[in-house]
């Protein structure tokens, strides 16, 4: 085959040498050339990083290259944070750093040794320059000309990110991977620093665009930028100089990261197959330093496909199709992690630097990609994590001989103290008669209160009969209902040390429907016996749903009074905590969202107006509820619909409830519009809790796909939320918290005395399971 690689970066060079080698194995002399615009030693950049795992992969494919890299790389394990005058270091992170020039020289030398033609100082204008090539590799980097030419086919999706960064070097040697954070009069800067040979370190400086502009760095040439950074990090540099190899650039050397992904990776141009590789097809932010890794692994996968299908021209179409299918999965996984890490650095100045103590800041930074969890940190550096847990315990008022995992530390607000950070999230059960909770609810909530959670939140309970979602929903508008609840609350208080909360909510346009297992199913109107609905605007939830009547001021006064009456009953029943349901498209949520509130009066229009009624209800409830008892507000922090509530709005909503006296925001999302397109995934709503907690400055509850102790520990430790609500796992296992404690080997937790005999057996079984897993790995 005749193969031309356009661009001699890591992708083009490594693919060229691997294919040459594959041909040799088959006794075929593929004609392979790499065409590069630069001179052999003329390249941008300093050091690049990749993980030990990438090195293992490379060794499998070409031992000579791997050995040459290994002879020249710097390997290090530690990450060090220098922040607010503190130095914190943790180990076990395993990176490899090598100068970009050195890496390219190794690849170039190997190409030459194998017989790849290297053509330097040649600008490729078009793929049409090589009509006789069977395969053209577009390894021409992030600004790929080939990708641009066939944009209609490749459909690139390029997002330019808001931060500015400059890629510098220094001759100061940094032993660990080092992060510096410095505050100026205009905001925060951070430096990412890693050694890549015996005398040199990469020194990337990054800041938000607004901070960069405020310092006039848009007008600074590379030398002025270097001088600025030297002054900024003078305490750390201690006289060492920063270096730039971007002097050839005109104007500012500060760039914005571009996230590139493409829908299609290859194309037949009429004479040759053209395929994108490396940065030309996808980029990964330097916050997880994986761009080179992706480029090298692309080269490996394409070679593997030729090896499997045959390295002759007729196999090219199937090889290219398989290459994209297989690589796309790994790439998207890595890009997602890189995206999280990148976003963390974009917002850390405003969201975390000023808010978090250095210990928690370090934890948050280490877990920024959300790929590294609490137990993963323990595996990397147990000593550091033990120290962190002790610090967290002290903050939570725990003084124990052994560190207590953050999930099991107590939490106090007003007069309530929860024994740990797990909350049984409210879950409608649709099985009350006339709104009265009976034996079913006693057993259901009682079992979960016995199961180890710090608090159990009873399902949405309605202030009037017409406020219910279904006829089976519980209510709190009469004495019989109050007595039903009191029996449950008394049981929980008598038999357990869990707290119990009530969630008050009005169904609005989503009322008068069947239970999920009845008739046409959830959210569908009842077959018979429907009642009239009210809502902020006359908009049905489902296209075939009943149209509610727009609420009048009289309706609003009546519903507010109903909420207050329920609050008095809730206090009488002895609940410890009240949650006001302002989420999921129910009445109060429907006032907040512009999708469901189209009112023309003072209660519609701007967000302030849309919040007016929910805040009036909140204030009335707060006044009626005992002062020593907390109130949380559940909101939908994202409608997942264009034009609906966004996380930006959610911060403002949280601020408004905070100002009105709310103690916590329970951060759910969606269910406001049937058109929603949520992005589900592990802990998918936790970013809302994180943002609200650290931007609005109010305690939060994270909820949604939190299903292991590891999740809870990571969320609480990083200061992303104060409590974690867990719903579906509690349907499957009422004793979820006790089970998770045993799973992670935390035995210092009380079981109900009647069930104690089960504790040590469960702990032993999990201990054996952990030992067996450790034995396997
Ligand atoms: C600040 C910063 C820090 C980074 N840190 C890391 C890190 O720590 N770890 C890591 O793995 N990655 C890192 N990267 C990313 C890494 O540099 C790239 O992901 C990687 O180099 C991609 O390899 P590539 O071969 O696809 O593209 P490139 O390395 O960009 O190579 C493309 C080549 O094509 C040539 N070329 C382009 N157009 C033409 C043309 N028309 N004719 C001829 N030649 C052409 C270019 O001159 C270049 O040599 C970092 C990037 C930046 C910006
Ligand atoms: C059966 C069921 C009923 C629910 N009922 C309510 C409810 O009454 N009030 C509420 O705010 N959320 C309700 N939810 C949402 C949960 O409280 C929780 O936010 C959601 O299930 C995501 O958490 P999970 O991933 O842990 O299940 C319900 C969820 C389920 C599965």
Image (cartoon, helix red, strand yellow):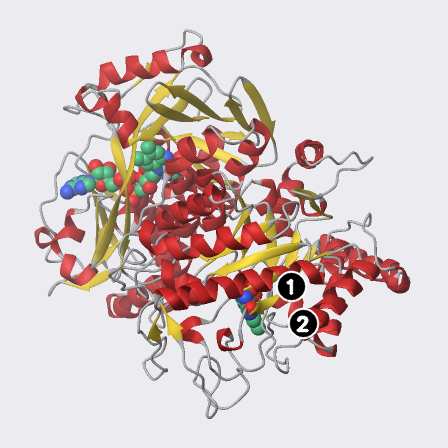
Viewer-proximal residue, 622 or 61?
Answer: 622
Q: CA distance from mark 2 to mark 1?
A: 8 Å
Could you tell me residue 261's position as x and y percent? 28, 54
Mark 2 or mark 1: which comes first in sequence? Answer: 2
User: Which image quadrant is residue 731 in?
Assistant: bottom right
Q: Is mark 2 within 8 Å of ligand 2?
A: no
Q: Kindly identify which residue carries mark 2.
A: 479
| Label 2, residues with CA under 10 Å away: few <14, some 14-19, many ≥20 | few
Could you tell me residue 698's position as x and y percent? 51, 41
Q: Residue at x 57, y 30 (%)?
A: 78
Q: Residue at x 52, y 45 (%)?
A: 53
Q: Ligand 2 lies in which image quarter?
A: bottom right
Mark 2 touches mark 1? (CB < 8 Å):
yes
Q: Residue at x 56, y 27 (%)?
A: 358
Viewer-proximal residue, 65 or 595?
Answer: 595
Could you tell me residue 571's position as x and y percent? 67, 58
Quadrant occupied by the N terminus: bottom left
Number of labels in the image equals 2
User: Which image quadrant is residue 677 in?
Assistant: bottom left
Q: Is mark 1 within 8 Å of ligand 2?
A: no
Q: Kindly identify which residue carries mark 1.
A: 569
| Residue 678 visible, this orientation | no
- Horizontal side, residue 595 vs residue 461: left or right: left
Mark 1 lies on a secondary structure that is helix
Mark 2 lies on a secondary structure that is helix
Could you tell me residue 154's position as x and y percent? 20, 59
């Amino acid at each position: 085959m005749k193969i031309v690689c356009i661009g001699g970066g890591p992708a083009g060079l490594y693919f060229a040498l691997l294919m040459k080698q594959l041909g040799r194995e088959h006794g075929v002399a593929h004609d392979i050339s790499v065409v590069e615009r630069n001179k052999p030693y003329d390249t941008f950049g300093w050091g690049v990083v990749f993980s030990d795992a990438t090195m293992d992969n490379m060794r499998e494919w070409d031992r000579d290259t791997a050995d040459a890299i290994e002879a020249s790389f710097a390997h290090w394990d530690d990450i060090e944070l220098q922040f607010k005058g503190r130095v914190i270091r943790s180990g076990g992170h395993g990176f490899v750093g090598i100068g970009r020039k050195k890496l390219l020289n190794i690849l170039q030398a190997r190409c030459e040794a194998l017989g790849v033609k290297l053509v330097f100082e040649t600008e490729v204008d078009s793929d049409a320059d090589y009509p006789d090539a069977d395969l053209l590799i577009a390894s021409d980097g992030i600004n790929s000309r080939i990708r641009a030419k066939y944009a209609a086919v490749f459909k690139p999706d390029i997002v330019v990110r808001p931060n500015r960064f400059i890629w510098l070097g220094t001759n100061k040697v940094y032993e660990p991977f080092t992060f510096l954070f410095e505050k100026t009069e205009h905001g925060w800067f951070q430096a990412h620093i890693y050694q890549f040979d015996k005398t040199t370190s990469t020194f990337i400086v990054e800041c938000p665009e607004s901070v960069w502009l405020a310092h006039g760095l848009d007008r600074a040439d590379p030398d002025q930028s270097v001088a600025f950074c030297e002054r900024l990090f003078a305490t750390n540099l201690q006289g060492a100089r920063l270096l730039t190899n971007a002097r050839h650039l005109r104007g500012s050397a500060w760039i914005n990261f571009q996230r590139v992904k493409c829908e299609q990776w290859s194309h037949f141009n009429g004479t040759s197959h053209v395929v994108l590789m490396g940065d030309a097809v996808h980029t990964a932010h330097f916050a997880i330093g994986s761009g080179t890794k992706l480029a090298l692994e692309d080269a490996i996968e394409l070679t593997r496909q030729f090896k499997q299908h045959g390295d002759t021209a007729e196999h090219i179409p199937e090889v290219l199709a398989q290459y994209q299918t297989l690589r796309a999965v790994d790439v998207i996984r890595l890009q997602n992690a890189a995206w999280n890490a990148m976003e963390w650095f974009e917002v850390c100045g405003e969201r975390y630097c000023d808010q978090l103590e250095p210990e928690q800041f370090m934890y948050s930074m280490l877990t920024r990609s959300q790929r590294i969890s609490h137990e993963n940190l323990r595996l990397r550096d147990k000593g550091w994590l033990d120290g962190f847990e002790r610090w967290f315990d002290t903050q939570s008022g725990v003084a124990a001989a052994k560190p207590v995992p953050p999930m099991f530390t107590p939490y106090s607000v007003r007069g309530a103290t929860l024994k740990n950070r797990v909350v049984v999230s409210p879950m409608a059960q649709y099985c009350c008669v006339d709104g009265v909770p009976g034996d079913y609810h006693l057993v259901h909530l009682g079992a979960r209160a016995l199961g180890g959670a710090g608090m159990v939140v009873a399902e949405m309970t309605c202030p009037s009969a017409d406020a219910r979602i279904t006829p089976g929903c519980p209510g709190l508008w009469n004495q019989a209902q109050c007595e039903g609840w009191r029996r449950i609350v008394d049981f929980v208080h008598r038999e357990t040390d869990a707290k119990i909360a009530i969630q008050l909510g009005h169904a609005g346009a989503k009322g008068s429907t069947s239970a999920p297992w009845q008739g046409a199913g959830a959210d569908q109107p009842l077959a018979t016996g429907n009642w009239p609905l009210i809502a902020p605007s006359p908009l049905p939830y489902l296209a075939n749903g009943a149209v509610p009547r727009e609420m009048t001021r009289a309706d609003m006064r009546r519903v507010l009074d109903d909420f207050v009456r329920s609050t008095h009953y809730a206090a009488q029943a002895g609940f410890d905590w009240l949650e006001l349901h302002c989420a999921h498209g129910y009445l109060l949520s429907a006032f907040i969202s512009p999708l469901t509130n189209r009112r023309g009066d003072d209660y519609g229009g701007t967000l302030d107006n849309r919040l007016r009624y929910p805040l009036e209800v909140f204030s009335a409830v707060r006044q009626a509820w005992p002062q020593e008892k907390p109130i949380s507000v559940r909101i939908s922090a994202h409608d997942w619909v264009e034009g609906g509530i966004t996380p930006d709005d959610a911060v403002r909503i949280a601020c408004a409830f905070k100002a009105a006296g709310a103690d916590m925001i329970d951060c759910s999302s969606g269910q406001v519009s049937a058109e929603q397109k949520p992005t589900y995934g592990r802990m998918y709503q936790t970013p809302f809790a994180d943002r609200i907690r650290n931007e609005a400055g109010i305690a939060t509850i994270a909820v949604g796909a939190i299903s292991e102790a590891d999740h809870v520990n990571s969320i609480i430790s990083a200061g992303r939320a104060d409590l974690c609500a867990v719903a579906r796992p509690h349907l499957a296992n009422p004793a979820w918290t006790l089970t998770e404690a045993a799973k992670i080997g935390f035995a210092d937790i009380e079981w109900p005395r009647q069930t104690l005999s089960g504790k040590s057996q469960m702990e032993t079984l999990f201990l054996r399971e952990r030992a067996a897993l450790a034995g396997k790995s």
